[in-house]
Amino acid sequence: TTKDAYFYTEENVKDPSKAEKQTFTVAYQAHVTNSEGNEGGALYWFATPFLVMDDYYTVGNGILFRELITNVGDKDVSVSIIGKLMGQTYLQITEQDRTLWTAIIVGVIPAAVLIAGIAVCVIRRRR
């Protein structure tokens, strides 16, 4: 970050003038080499546990993580498809509809099954 970056804590969040301002490291990258000087790999460290969490995916962390995986891989060319967030919509019904369907499911259907069962029993006994 720049030297003007700020850091809020629970104590100074209500008074922004007390926020700590300085340069903060948000990520590190280290390349590992073996004894012959050949590159053996890379290590990436991020100062956040929220890098791959769903809530923060749309803020840019998902793009950063995807690019990191692309750069770490052995392939020169990579094709990736960015997923689309799918929202969940709920069924909305009115109070009248709820009352009607409750009466049908709790009252009418069980009563119809009970009446049909009694009718079958009565018909079988009369034979």
Image (spheres, rainbow, N blue to C red):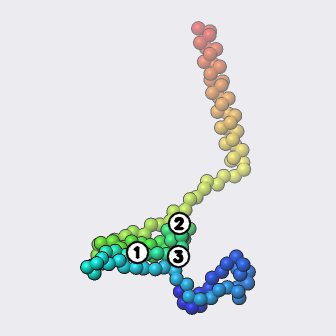
Pointer 3 and pointer 1: residues touching (CB < 8 Å)? no
Which of the two labelled residues, at mark 2 and mark 1, occupies the earlier sequence position? 1
Q: Quick check: 114 above or below 46?
A: above
- Local crowd size for mark 1, using a 10 Å CA cut-off: few (<14), some (14–19), many (≥20): few
Residue drawn at point x = 49 percent, y = 75 percent: 46
Q: Residue furthest bottom?
A: 3
Residue 97 at x, y percent in the picture = 68, 47
Please say whether residue 9 is visible from this viewpoint: yes
Q: 118 or 22, which lies in front?
A: 22
Q: Is residue 100 left or right of residue 70?
A: right
Q: Which amino acid lies under the numbered mark 1 shown in the image of this protein?
A: Leu
Quadrant location of the C terminus in the rendered image: top right
What is the number of the mark on residue 43? 1
Q: Quadrant of residue 35?
A: bottom left
Which of the two labelled residues, at mark 3 and mark 2, occupies the earlier sequence position? 3
Q: Which residue is mark 3?
A: 47
Q: Residue furthest left?
A: 36
Q: Is residue 19 left or right of residue 28?
A: right
Q: Which residue is mark 2?
A: 54
Q: Residue furthest right?
A: 14
Q: 62 or 95, which lies in front?
A: 62
